[in-house]
Image: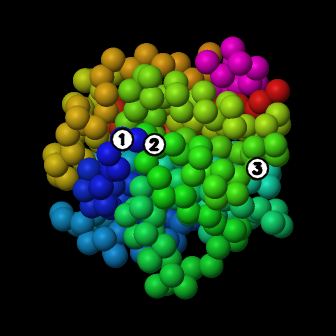
Amino acid sequence: MTQQADWDIVTDVGITALAVAAARAIESHRTNPLVSDPCAELFVAAARPQPAMPTRQADAAESWRDMADYMGVRSRYFDEYFAAEKTGQAVVLAAGLDVRGHRLDWPPGAVVYELDVPKVLQFKQNVLADNGVAARAEIRNVAVDLRDDWPAALMGAGFDRTAPSSWLAEGLLPFLPNDAVERLFTLVDELAAPGSRFAVEHIDIDIKELENQQPMSDMARDYGMNLLDMWPKGKTFAPAPWLADRGWRVTSTPVVAAAEGYGRPLRDSAAGLRHTVLITATKG
């Protein structure tokens, strides 16, 4: 077993989850939002990051508005993924401050498994409980570091590997080296029954380029994030071919195309976010 990760919501990887929530809050307050997440602003208010993170467009610098555009598109795409073909169980890997179990419609008896480190899950639980936010599915928190034996923890929480499931890896793969990504995909492939689905956010750019591009460069400067330390270099793993080679039916959508389809084109100033591919796949 590796050493258990000890970050919370305002340190290390946790601060990125909080920034994502702030961007979703900005998007949610727009006149015609791509996603509505009233919990996002609650998380930012509870965490009190320094410097403060904006939750309204009027208070947001250009880099934050670009981040909100991107997160709106990404969140909408994966919301539609869960809505398209509902399964009785969903697994959110590195769930962070994702609250789809609280804001999306789920079939009766659905279970949403949220995997993340203990401090992040506890922070989220506390904020939701303090604000009386009710879940729309049964939420099962699986407090585990994805470098450890997370399949055993997931099975221990009641996951049924014989039944179809829907999986999500959103905002996760950039933090993993090639071998860890392949291990993750191998384990998902082993645990997913025929008819299961897998959605992935894949950033197809070298971190050395990304650290100097907006809006990531501003985020790194303001919140002390060292992207070179957080995101491994030399990323070569290609999710779509890997899944296709193992019998998954794969659809890949460049985020720029998804944004155009939603009527929310990403601006040129969001250069560091325009290299993403949004992937969905169905097994067998």
Mark 1 is surrounded, within 10 Å at the Cα level, by few (under 14), some (14 to 19) or many (20 or more) other residues, namely: few
Badge 3 marks a residue whose secondary structure is loop
Instruction: Name the kind of residue labelled 2 in the image.
Output: Asp
Examine the rendered structure and indicate whether residue 203 appears above or below residue 31: above
Examine the rendered structure and indicate whether residue 145 appears above or below residue 126: above
- The answer to which of 183 and 203 lies nearer the viewer is 183
- Residue located at (64% from left, 55% from top): 156
Instruction: Examine the rendering and report whether any part of residue 7 can be seen.
Output: yes
Examine the rendered structure and indicate whether residue 19 appears above or below residue 191: below
Disc 2 versus disc 1: distance between alpha carbons? 6 Å
Disc 3 versus disc 2: distance between alpha carbons? 20 Å
- Residue located at (33% from left, 50% from top): 5
In which quadrant will I find the C terminus? top right
Badge 1 marks a residue whose secondary structure is loop
- The answer to which of 98 and 55 lies nearer the viewer is 98
Residue 147 spot, x, y in % from top left: 43, 40
Instruction: Name the kind of residue labelled 3 in the image.
Output: Asp
Mark 3 is surrounded, within 10 Å at the Cα level, by few (under 14), some (14 to 19) or many (20 or more) other residues, namely: some
**Was residue 69 drawn as part of the magenta stretch in this picture?**
no
**Was residue 249 drawn as part of the magenta stretch in this picture?**
yes
Magenta-tinted stretch: 242-255
- In this image, 47 relative to 130: left or right? left
The numbered mark, 1 or 3, whose residue comes first in the sequence reads 1
Residue 266 spot, x, y in % from top left: 45, 39
Residue 65 spot, x, y in % from top left: 36, 52
Instruction: Name the kind of residue labelled 1 in the image.
Output: Thr
Label placed on residue 160: 3
- In this image, 148 relative to 2: left or right? right
Label placed on residue 2: 1
Mark 2 is surrounded, within 10 Å at the Cα level, by few (under 14), some (14 to 19) or many (20 or more) other residues, namely: some
Label placed on residue 148: 2
- Residue located at (28% from left, 37% from top): 230
